Amino acid sequence: MNKKTLRDILILLGIIIIAAIGARYLGSGETLSDYAKKNPEAAGVLNEAGSYSGTDSSESGKESGSSSGGAVLGSSGQALSPVAQSESNEATENSSKEKGISYSADRSTIIPQNSSTNSTTATASSSSASGTTIAASGSSASDTTTSSSSSPASGTTAAASGSPAEDTDSSPVSVSTTSTERTTYMDGFYYEPISNDIFRRISGISYPVDCKIPLDDLRYLSLLYNDFNGDTKTGEMICNKDIAQDVIEIFYELYKSGYQLESVKLIDEFGGDDNASMLANNTSCFNYRVVAGTTRLSNHARGLAIDINPFYNPYITYNKDGSVNISPAGSEAYADRSASFPYKIDDSDLACKLFKSHGFTWGGDWNSVKDYQHFERPQ
């Protein structure tokens, strides 16, 4: 070995010794293994994803913040001093909190922030996704609804939006309180199951306590119409679910064509009184009642019949003595169907054509009685 080689070796050994002394000085006089033995709890650290890394972790070395020989390493792979480790842990916690993660006192357990809220939200989302429906019989429950439009051609049913309301009615009738399915045909034209709000409006009136028609068989309709001044108004109606799509299509065509209706309100606005509704020339559908003068349920009771502009298209019955009964009172001038007057329904009337094209029959075609306002779907 020549002198030059020996000198190089001595220089290298000197550098190693100086580096070792410097490392011991920076480590506050402790080796990394000494510090790990005195502070075993600091030999591991939770990474931002919540994985615990350390001497007792089976996943040690695979995640950020993993340990080497029980020590915490910095981003450069160098060992951190206790002070630096503390600062690193604090930075990790701050970053984790920003992501909605917190830890137990010993950092061994992840504690989700707002855990109760998240759990409730997850449960609600799961129920919504599965289409779960909760029936309430006289119990309080929130009516949550979601809205979505659908294709006019397909009449696709989507979740609908409605006014949340609590069901406090003591009636034994089951009311859907989880979600309301709304089918939108066109802007301003949709139908949906009977909500809690609507049920409260009709309960004891058009829907009496002895009503034999299940609420699930009915649909609430919202539609646009042209009033007698030619102004656009929003009307509402309740009909049987079997004709809801047909009815919404018919009234859309009437509206688009400028057909005029004086009023389109639930008959409950008139106390469920058919005569009062006819006198107001109100177009309506569902009303749990019998046929006038009989004990037989009307098709209005099933939501399968609709009266259009009834004051100008009266209901006429014929007595054996040749006399006639015209309802509503005051509409006698419109019993003469050979006369020409506005809002008269006959075979050439658009409403008559549309209803017939959708499978309805017209009371003006009946023999023993004439009900010119009346269209119904045979069952």
Image: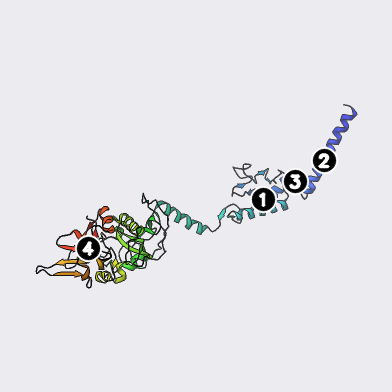
Q: How many labels, in total? A: 4
Q: CA distance from mark 4 to mark 2?
A: 112 Å
Residue position marked by numbered label 2 in the rendering: 17
**Nearest to N terminus: mark 3 or mark 4:** 3
Q: Amino acid at mark 3?
A: Thr
Q: Which of the two discs, 4 and 2, sits closer to the camera?
A: 4
Q: Amino acid at mark 2?
A: Ile
Residue position marked by numbered label 3 in the rendering: 31
Q: Position of residue 242 (x, y in %)?
A: 28, 55
Residue 42: which disc? 1
Residue sticking out furthest to the bottom: 330
**Nearest to N terminus: mark 2 or mark 3:** 2
Q: Residue at x 66, y 49 (%)?
A: 40
Residue position marked by numbered label 4 in the rendering: 372
Q: Secondary structure at mark 4?
A: loop
Q: Secondary structure at mark 3?
A: loop
Q: Residue at x 43, y 52 (%)?
A: 129
- Foreground pick, 162 / 86: 162
Q: Secondary structure at mark 1?
A: helix
Quarter that holds the C terminus: bottom left
Q: CA distance from mark 1 to mark 3?
A: 14 Å
- Foreground pick, 217 / 278: 278
**Nearest to N terminus: mark 1 or mark 3:** 3
Residue sticking out furthest to the front: 340
